[in-house]
Amino acid sequence: MALIDRFLASHVKRGLLHVTHANGEKRTFGAADPDMPEVAIRFADRGVPLAIVRNPGLGAAEMFMDGRLIIESGDIRGLIVLLKANTLWEAGRKSIEPILPLRLLGSVSHRVDRINMARRSKRNVAHHYDLSDRLYDLFLDADRQYSCAYYTDPANTLDQAQADKKAHIAAKLLLKPGMRVLDIGCGWGGLALYLHAKTGADVLGITLSEEQLKVARRRAADGGVADKVRFELIDYRELTGQFDRIVSVGMFEHVGPPQYRTFFRKCRELLAPDGVMLVHTIGRMGKPGVTDDFTAKYIFPGGYNPALSEIVRAYEGLRLFPTDIEVLRLHYAWTLDAWYDRTVAAKDAIVALYDERFYRMWTFYLAGAGTAFRHGGLCNYQIQLARSRVVVPITRDYIVDAERALRAQSG
């Protein structure tokens, strides 16, 4: 039995995977399961199995992107689910990893890349967020929220779930008219504009993406609120002044562990004595680790999803009160499902915009990420911190009450 066959036989137990080798030999792995997909793949040449065995995640991605790993029945999401759902994080089985020398090399390179000094941060952000506006319009919601939505009901639309996410965050910020709010990593400006529209707060959004900045400023100008919702191209480390509230959604993943302490120290410096801040970030439910090779190479260079312990250690000793910590488990899986479905529906437009290889890379990214939240060890953390022990109510009822009030507002 070929090495790839032994590899697949050990990892695929539930669900069916049919494999056709380059020489025409066929193999089937696993067992039929109504809760698992059935997928048929073909290796275009003999180099494909070796690339996958050498580094499963990156190898499978690149072979798929290059059209050498061909899916003949099913789709890339089904293939990834077959592999990941058979190694559930909570079951304690080891996930699929590269062979030892490559794993050690990758661990070293990821830790070096995570240093994330200011110049590198801007380059890393541009790698992903300065892609064509048209691409993001094709798979995101109308407000271009490129982070985990909040599903009060799994059946909700993506647009509804993203609106509910903004309400959930606004409720935790306890905003009042005229408050000064800092949005670190403001994206295309949707949250900043929402916070002003719903609460009357003045918002400064900062980003390292020149393309996002253009869109955010245009939206504020078009809405006639450019004097109340401002956007700047600046690193958070260079900011001065004080803010009543600080919010950061989907940015902390790009800070890098060596800079975590710097991030929270700077936020405390910027936060008013009665201020409140909220950090919304992808996180790992287990111990600290490293970013997978595919994501680090093609999607988020310099990116890293922190363990909760790494976040807590970073603000310990800074006299910030952890006033609320919420764990969102399946919300991002549902979000990514919606993004994946929209991407597939927009295949022709994406291929015309880039090419077939980019389309395959993007679907691999979305499918892999969604599976990591549904079957792996990823989640989202919302961490609320304050400089005062009394500024936030002592029960969580206020969050639900404020959310309901925000949703009841028109517009």
Image (tube, rainbow, N blue to C red):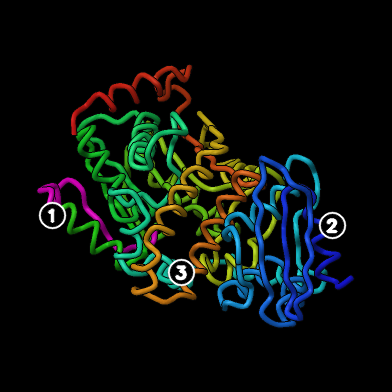
Q: Give the vertical position of 229 relative to 405 (above or below).
A: below
Q: Closer to the N terminus: mark 3 or mark 2?
A: 2
Crowding at dot 3, Cα within 10 Å, few <14 / some 14-19 / many 20+, comes out as many
Image quarter of the C terminus? top left
Which residue is identified by label 3? Answer: 359
Please state if 94 lies on the left or on the right of 344 as rendered: right
Give the spatial CA distance, label 3 vs label 2. Answer: 30 Å
Q: Closer to the N terminus: mark 2 or mark 1?
A: 2
Which residue is identified by label 2? Answer: 10
Q: Position of residue 394 (x, y in %)?
A: 47, 17
Q: Is residue 255 visible?
A: yes
**Region of the chain picked out in magenta, as a range:** 222-235
Quadrant assignment, res 251: bottom left
Please state if 14 lies on the left or on the right of 396 as rendered: right
Where disc 1 sits, the SS reads helix
Which residue is identified by label 1? Answer: 221
Amino acid bearing label 3 = Tyr
Where disc 3 sits, the SS reads helix
Q: How many marks?
A: 3
Q: Position of residue 359 (x, y in %)?
A: 46, 69
Amino acid bearing label 1 = Ala
Image quarter of the N terminus? bottom right
Q: Closer to the N terminus: mark 1 or mark 3?
A: 1
Question: Comparing marks 1 and 3, which lies closer to the viewer?
Answer: 3
Front residue of 368 and 324: 368
Q: Give the vertical position of 270 relative to 185 (above or below).
A: above
Crowding at dot 2, Cα within 10 Å, few <14 / some 14-19 / many 20+, comes out as few
Q: Give the vertical position of 100 relative to 241 (above or below).
A: below
Q: Position of residue 336 (x, y in %)?
A: 49, 49
Look at the image and say whether residue 166 sits in the magenta stretch. Answer: no
Front residue of 327 and 276: 327
Q: Residue at x 52, y 32 (%)?
A: 321
